Image (cartoon, rainbow, N blue to C red):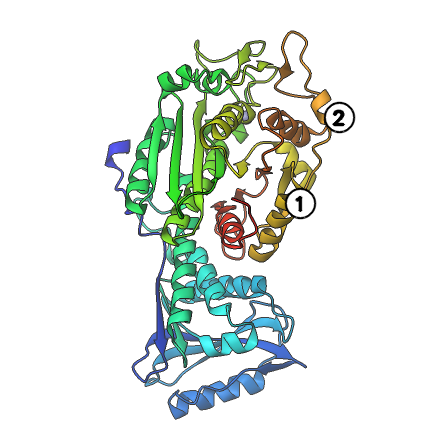
Amino acid sequence: MRKEGEIMAKAESDLGIDVRLSSWSPRLRADVLLIPAAMAGGKVRTRLINRLPRAAASRLDELIAGYHGVKKSGAVDDAILPGKAPFRRVAIVSLGEQGKVKPGDVRSAAGAAADWCARHGFRHVAVDGDALQLAANKDAPAQWVEASGLAAYRYTRLRSKPAGDNARPIESVVLASSNPGAALRGAIERAHALSQCVNLARELGHEPPNVINPVTLAERVRKIARAAGLRCTVFDERQLKTKRMGAFLAVGAGSATPPRMIVLEHRGKSGGRPVVLVGKAVTLDTGGYSIKPAASIPDMKYDKCGGMAVIGAMVAAARLKLKVNLIGVLGAAENMISSKAFRPGDIVTASNGTTIEINNTDAEGRLVLADCLVYSAQAFKPAVIIDLATLTGAITTALGNACGGLYSNNDKLAESLIAAGERTDERLWRMPLWTAYRDQLVGTDSDLKNVGGPAGGANTAAAFLREFVDDKTPWAHLDIAGVARTDKALAYCPIGATGFGVRLLIDLLSSGALPG
Ligand SMILES: [Zn+2]
C-alpha cells in the first residue's frame, strides 16, 4: 500500500501544455495542422495556406472541396498528408456557422479538437491562427489556447502508471500566424497562464482528504503563494479562538486536523479598498453526526472547490499583474465525527455575537463562511465581497449543472457577475434573497438556526450568510455546488473538479466593472 509520503509530487508548474506562437515557416513541424473554419451555405470558408508544400496544399484543397459541411462547432474532418509534409495530417475543425461564431464556440471547438488529437495519438498540434481569426474574432487565438490548456488537463499525480493511451492528452500547441506580433503574443501568454491557474484549482480540488486537510492545505497554499508572489497569512485554531470564531471552530472540532483560515493578498495598485474573495474549503464533509449517505461521501473532497477557485483566482491575479487590490480568505475545516465533534442541538456563537442552533451538522459551510465574512469586513473594509462555496445540494436541484446560483445585495455587482459568466461560459443565475427565507431561520433558543427546513434550501443558506454581511458592502454569494465538479467529461474539462469561478472572477476583475 502506498503511504502519503511515497507519493511523488508533481511540480505545480506542470499544469498545462507547451504553447508557442510562430510565424508560418517551412520549419514548422507538428503531428497535425488544425484549420478552424466557419461554415457558410454548407461550404467551408477559410483561406488557403500557400506556405504549405504543394502536395500538402492540394490534399487540403480536396479536403475542403469534399467537406460535408457540418455546422456544429467542434466537428473534425481530416486528411492524411504525403510522407514529406511537415504535418502527418491536416484537419478542418468547424467553429459553426459563419457570422455566428461566439467565444464559447471557439473554446468548445478547441476542446473537441484536443480530444480528437488525443484519440489519434497526436501530441504536438499546430493551429492555423489566421484561419481562426478570420472565422471567429481577433481574440480567438487566446480563446483557443485557453481551452486547449484546459482540455489537456488530467489529474494523474496519484497514478502509478499511465491510464492508457486514450487518456493521453495533447502536449503542445503551436499557433501559426502571419502576424505574430507582441499583442497576439501577450494575449496568448495570458490565456495560457489563466488555463494553468484553472488547472491549479482543479488539481487541488481532486486531492483526496488523506493528502489535503486544513493543515496540509495551509502548507501547500504557503508554497503556492511564495511562488506566485502573494502574501500569505495562516490563522491556526488558537488564533481563531481568540477571534471568537465559534461557528467556524465548531465545524472543525471533530477532526484530528484543526481548522485553518488562510488569507492571501495581491497588491495590484496603491490605495483603494480591496475586493475580498471568500472561499469555502471543507476538505472533507462527512456531514458530521447528521451523516451523509455512504455513497455520497467520497465526492465530498470536492467540498473545498470554492476555496480552490479563490486560490486559482489569486494566483492568476498575481501572474497577470491585475491592477486591483485583491484578498482571498479561505475557511478550511474537515467535518468529521468524534467525541469532540459538534452536535445537533449545540448552540454556538459566531464572531459577530450571533448565536446559532445547530439543527444539522451537514449545513456546515455556512458556519465556516459566517466567521470568514465577518472577518473579511472587519479586517479589510472591502469595496466588494464575493464568496464561492459548494454550499447546498438544493442549488443543484434548482439549477442543475448548467450554472451556479448567484445571490447578491447589489444589482450592479450581480449584473457584472452575470455578464462575466456569459463571456466565460461560467454562467450564473440570480436567485432571491427575500426576508421570507430569513424568517425560516429564526431560532427558538438562539438567534438563528443553521437550517431553514426542506423548502428553498439554497435560498435559506444564502439568507443565513447575509446575516453576517453589512448590507452597505456590495456582496455576492455564488453557490457552485452544481458546477464545481462534473461526473461526465465536458467540452474542455475531464471528470472531476472543473475549476469553476477562476475564469469568471478574472474576467470580472479585468473588466473594470467593480468599484474599489
Ligand atoms: Zn455539509
Judged by depth in the image, the label closer to the viewer, 1 or 2, is 2
Callout 2: SS: helix
Q: Quick check: can you spot residue 357?
A: no
The residue beneath circle 2 is: 436
Q: Earlier in the sequence, mark 1 or mark 2?
A: 1
Q: Is residue 409 above or below residue 51?
A: above
Q: Horizontal and vertical percent for residue 340?
A: 43, 10
Q: Horizontal and vertical percent for residue 407?
A: 64, 37
Q: Residue at 63% of width from left, 16% of height from top?
A: 449
- Horizontally, is 311 left or right of 43 in the view? left
Q: Quick check: can you spot residue 119?
A: yes
The crowd level at tag 1 (other Cα within 10 Å; few <14, some 14-19, many 20+) is some
User: Where in the image, quadrant-wise, is ligand 1 located?
Assistant: top right
Q: Horizontal and vertical percent for residue 485?
A: 52, 42
Residue type at numbered disc 1: Trp
Callout 1: SS: strand
Q: Residue furthest top?
A: 445
Label 1 to label 2: alpha-carbon separation: 20 Å
Q: Quadrant of the N terminus?
A: top left
Q: Residue at 54% of width from left, 78% of height from top?
A: 134
Residue type at numbered disc 2: Ala
Q: Residue furthest right?
A: 436
The crowd level at tag 2 (other Cα within 10 Å; few <14, some 14-19, many 20+) is few
Between residue 318 and residue 450, name the one nearer to us.
318
The mark found on residue 364 in the picture is none
The image quarter in which residue 95 lies = bottom right
Between residue 25 and residue 74, name the one nearer to us.
25
The image quarter in which residue 32 lies = bottom left
The mark found on residue 429 in the picture is 1
